[in-house]
Image (tube, helix red, strand yellow):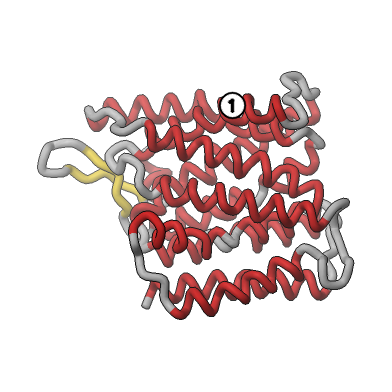
Amino acid sequence: MDGTVRKRLGVTRTRERDGRFAEVPARRPAVGMALGALSVSVSPVVIDLSGTSPGTASFYRCLPALPVLAVLARRERRRTGARVRGRWLPALAGVLFAGDMLLWTQAIADVGAGLSTVLVNVQVVLVPLLAWIIDRERVTAAFALALPILIAGVVLTAGLADGASTGRAPGTGAALAVLAALCYAGFLFLLRRGDGRLPIGAYRDVTAAAALASLVGGAFWQGVDLAPGWAAFGWLLVASLTSQIVGWLLVALCSPRLPSHVGASILLLTPAGAVAMAAIFLNERPSPLQLLGCVLILIGAYVVSARRRS
């Protein structure tokens, strides 16, 4: 990522007291975060179009990104003169990210690309739970208010209330999406605690760990096809480009530089974009109650974000 791109996305270099360069946001880190969230929203649509197994899709989302991230990480290391500290943290984040991808990819087939992405974003409520358990952060009344809203939203979005579905197994898909949300929340929780001096290097390690975990996990769950065909590989290459190389890299760079409530709110662009693109490209037509469930999930997420802001 060259200097012009960094400047436009709100990421520049500044000299610290020790003479090293570090990545810091300039004027528009929120713009970079928003672009990252929208880029990630493309992946459920192209993964569905690939027609591959969860392990295959997850592995090939990560693998093509690694050479690009390795080059960027080397340039970052040469510029800073630093080394990534605590590699166990990005490794654990990568394993959780792989769990999220494997479960979420299956949920896409079961409940639909758009709705599965909405369901996964109950992470906005799960992250405060992790903060309460690990960091002893106080859980407020606003969180208690958001919880039943989220539960109602999940039930409606899954099509359990009216029997509607944009997928083949809405109940199973909803359960898998919520499990994916648990992994997703853990991944985001750890991502913010990465090495702030070398965010690209840390993200490279996350992606490498996710690729390995996806290969191993996928081998035991529906298998991994290392030669899925050119058409499928093309769609997965698009997923890797939009999600791993552009989307999550921008999130990794920008989210530590934004207040947590701002980052959580901006990430809601991902499910909103996924629902819109699934309707356009996959002809998914959620029922009115499912759309109401999407709205309730977004409202619950906003309540939690507003609580953090206050």
The answer to which of 104 and 147 lies nearer the viewer is: 147
Task: Give the residue furthest to the left.
Answer: 17
Q: Position of residue 89 (x, y in %)?
A: 38, 37
For the C terminus, the quadrant is bottom left
Q: Is residue 85 above or below residue 267?
A: above
Which kind of residue does numbered mark 1 sit on?
Leu
Q: Position of residue 287 (x, y in %)?
A: 84, 70
The reply, left or right, for residue 22 in relation to residue 294 is left
Figure quadrant of residue 280: bottom right
The answer to which of 189 and 13 lies nearer the viewer is: 189
The reply, left or right, for residue 231 in relation to residue 239 is right
- The local crowd at label 1, few if under 14, some if 14 to 19, many if 20 or more residues have their Cα within 10 Å, is some
Q: Position of residue 21 (x, y in %)?
A: 22, 38
What element does badge 1 sit on? Answer: loop
| Residue drawn at the location 85% of the way across and 52% of the way down | 169
For the N terminus, the quadrant is top left
Q: Is residue 1 visible?
A: no
The answer to which of 67 and 121 lies nearer the viewer is: 121
Q: Position of residue 299 (x, y in %)?
A: 59, 75
Q: Is residue 87 visible?
A: yes
Residue under label 1, please give it.
Answer: 63
Q: Is residue 111 above or below residue 67?
A: below
Figure quadrant of residue 237: top right
| Residue drawn at the location 34% of the way across and 61% of the way down | 136
Figure quadrant of residue 242: top right
| Residue drawn at the location 44% of the way across and 57% of the way down | 130
